[in-house]
Image (cartoon, rainbow, N blue to C red):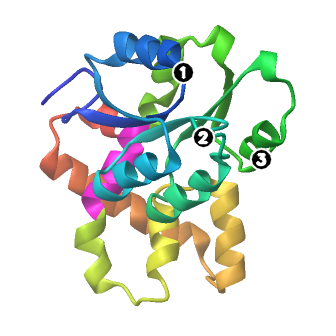
């Protein structure tokens, strides 16, 4: 289904034990995104291992009180550039679950009591589009790449430049700029062939 944010319906995973948070998110973005709701770690894992998600919003604990921080690492092992938003509660204070989720380096941290869903969504749209493009172009790249370079090239399509530079140094890649340019050219060529966006939007 087409929508204002891209060619296909965007899938967002929300792990929250709060009916209020779930209701607010669905009401705010339900027309733009498909919201997969989970109340437990197991339920969330089933969602992100069987569906391609564009972003995840996690409260600090599930309904059983289990910390959600481990999910950040699990999801990013499948989706390197996945935007993850931590939803924390001012009323809960600095609990162990809150600190663990913040230390897992989410893309953003927001307060449940002041959750401005529409602003949050607008800030994540560029990341949604980048994530979708990486997922689209990857199947055509993977067969032609040496296995040792595959993880690095996948990261190059979605990483911040400084983080990419660090990964390249560790893996002995000499010309980081050449790698970045090559990935960009392939992604742009793919987008121009397969998407209806303008050249400016793709750029």
Q: Earlier in the sequence, mark 2 or mark 1?
A: 1
Q: Residue at x 41, y 68 (%)?
A: 182
Q: Magenta includes 20?
A: no
Q: Is residue 67 above or below residue 2?
A: below
Give the dominant element type of the magenta stretch: helix, strand or loop: helix
Figure quadrant of the C terminus = top left
Q: Residue at x 40, y 58 (%)?
A: 184
Q: Earlier in the sequence, mark 3 or mark 1?
A: 1
Disc 3/disc 2 C-alpha distance (Å): 17 Å
Q: Looking at the image, is mark 3 or mark 1 nearer the viewer?
A: 1
Disc 2 to disc 1: CB gap under 8 Å: no
Looking at the image, residue 31 sits to the left or right of residue 75; the answer is left
Disc 2/disc 1 C-alpha distance (Å): 12 Å
Figure quadrant of the N terminus = top left
- Give the extent of the magenta segment: 128-137
Disc 3/disc 1 C-alpha distance (Å): 19 Å
> x, y percentage for residue 100?
77, 47
Mark 3 secondary-structure assignment: helix
Q: Residue at x 45, y 39 (%)?
A: 55
> x, y percentage for residue 98?
77, 36
User: Looking at this view, is 70 or 149 the one in front?
Assistant: 70
Q: Which residue is mark 2?
A: 64
Mark 1 secondary-structure assignment: loop
Looking at the image, residue 130 sits to the left or right of residue 123; the answer is left
Mark 2 secondary-structure assignment: loop
Q: Which residue is mark 1?
A: 18
Q: Is residue 173 above or below residue 52?
A: below
Q: Residue at x 48, y 36 (%)?
A: 39
Q: Quadrant of residue 189?
A: bottom left
């Amino acid at each position: 289904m087409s929508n204002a944010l891209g060619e296909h319906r965007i899938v967002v995973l929300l792990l929250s034990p709060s009916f209020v948070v779930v209701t607010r998110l669905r009401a705010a973005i339900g027309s733009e995104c498909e919201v997969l709701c989970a109340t437990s770690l197991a339920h969330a894992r089933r969602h992100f291992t069987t569906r391609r998600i564009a972003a995840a919003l996690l409260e600090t604990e599930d309904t059983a009180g289990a910390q959600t921080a481990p999910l950040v690492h699990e999801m990013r092992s499948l989706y390197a550039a996945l935007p993850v938003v931590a939803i924390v509660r001012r009323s809960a204070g600095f609990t162990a679950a809150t600190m663990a989720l913040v230390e897992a380096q989410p893309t953003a941290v927001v307060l449940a009591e002041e959750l401005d869903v529409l602003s949050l969504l607008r800030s994540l749209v560029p990341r949604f589009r980048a994530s979708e493009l990486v997922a689209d172009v990857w199947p055509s790249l993977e067969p032609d790449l040496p296995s040792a370079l595959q993880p690095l090239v996948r990261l190059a399509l979605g990483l911040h430049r400084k983080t990419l530079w660090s990964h390249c140094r560790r893996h002995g890649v000499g010309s980081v700029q050449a790698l970045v340019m090559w990935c960009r050219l392939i992604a742009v060529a793919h987008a121009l062939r397969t998407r209806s966006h303008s050249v400016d939007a793709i750029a």
